[in-house]
Amino acid sequence: MIKLNCPVCDYQEIEGDTCPNCDTDLSVIRMLQELPQVENPLRQVKIPNWQLGVALLLLIIGIGLGVMGSFIFLQPQLHTLTISSPNPVLKLPVNTAPVTVKEPPKPITYTVKLGDHLSAIAQQFCGEGTSWQVMVKANPRLKGREDYIDVGEVLKIPNCKEGN
């Protein structure tokens, strides 16, 4: 029977399946130690050189087909259209409609009055069921003091139609 050293407490020359010092179970280690030794399992498989050559040739052909396929199917911009006319003229439609630029909506503000709180202001401007978090999102300086707003403080009112 092989004598083992405990991997936990380093107790030396244990003959049983349990360490007498720390009660570690050594049965799996003992089974692995008692398995027959194999010299070199990879040396047992012999592959003839011609088979390695064929495998390498097939690998090179596969890579070549993959590269050619990517050039043919994945890069259509490489294929060009030739025009036989000596002076080709390209006519594009011209849009004559006047361009109007929309000005962004002016931000709405609200000055806090005595007795106001964020939930009431949010419901007043954004409708029932709107949470006070909408107001904090539009006014980041309120974060951490949601329960206390100053009288006279100017708050930005979010555009509730955008889903803030």
Image (cartoon, rainbow, N blue to C red):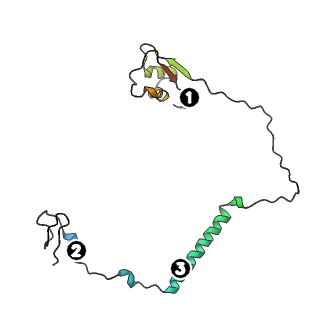
* Quadrant of res 43: bottom left
* Residue 137 versus residue 40 in the image, above or below: above
How many residues crowd mark 3 within 10 Å: few (<14), some (14–19), many (20+)?
few
Task: Give the position of the N terminus as an image quadrant.
Answer: bottom left
Q: Amino acid at mark 2?
A: Met
| Viewer-nearest residue: 8 or 45 | 8
Horizontal and vertical percent position of residue 119: 43, 22
Q: Amino acid at mark 1?
A: Lys
Q: Position of residue 60 (x, y in %)?
A: 58, 75
**Residue 71 numbered tag:** none
Specify whether residue 121 is in view.
Answer: yes
- The reply, left or right, for residue 56 in relation to residue 101 is left
Say whether disc 1 or disc 3 marks the residue closer to the N-terminus. 3
Number of the label disc, if any, that sits on residue 31: 2
SS at circle 1:
helix
Left or right of 61? Residue 114 is: left
The residue pinned by badge 1 equals 161
Tell me the SS state at disc 2.
helix
Amino acid type shown at disc 3: Ala
The mark nearer the N terminus, 2 or 1, is 2
Could you give the CA–CA distance between mark 3 and mark 2, rounded to whole angstroms? 40 Å
Q: Position of residue 131 (x, y in %)?
A: 45, 27
Mark nearer the viewer, 2 or 1: 2
- Residue at the image position 86 percent from the left and 60 percent from the top: 84
Q: Residue furthest top?
A: 114
- The structure residue drawn at horizontal position 81% and vertical position 60%, both measured from the top left corner, is 82
Kindly state the secondary structure of the residue where label 3 is placed. Answer: helix
Q: Residue at x 62, y 68 (%)?
A: 67
Quarter assignment of residue 30: bottom left
Contact (CB < 8 A) between labels 1 and 3? no
Judge from the rendering whether residue 41 lies leftward or rightward of residue 163; answer left or right. left
Identity of the residue drawn at 44% across and 22% down: 118
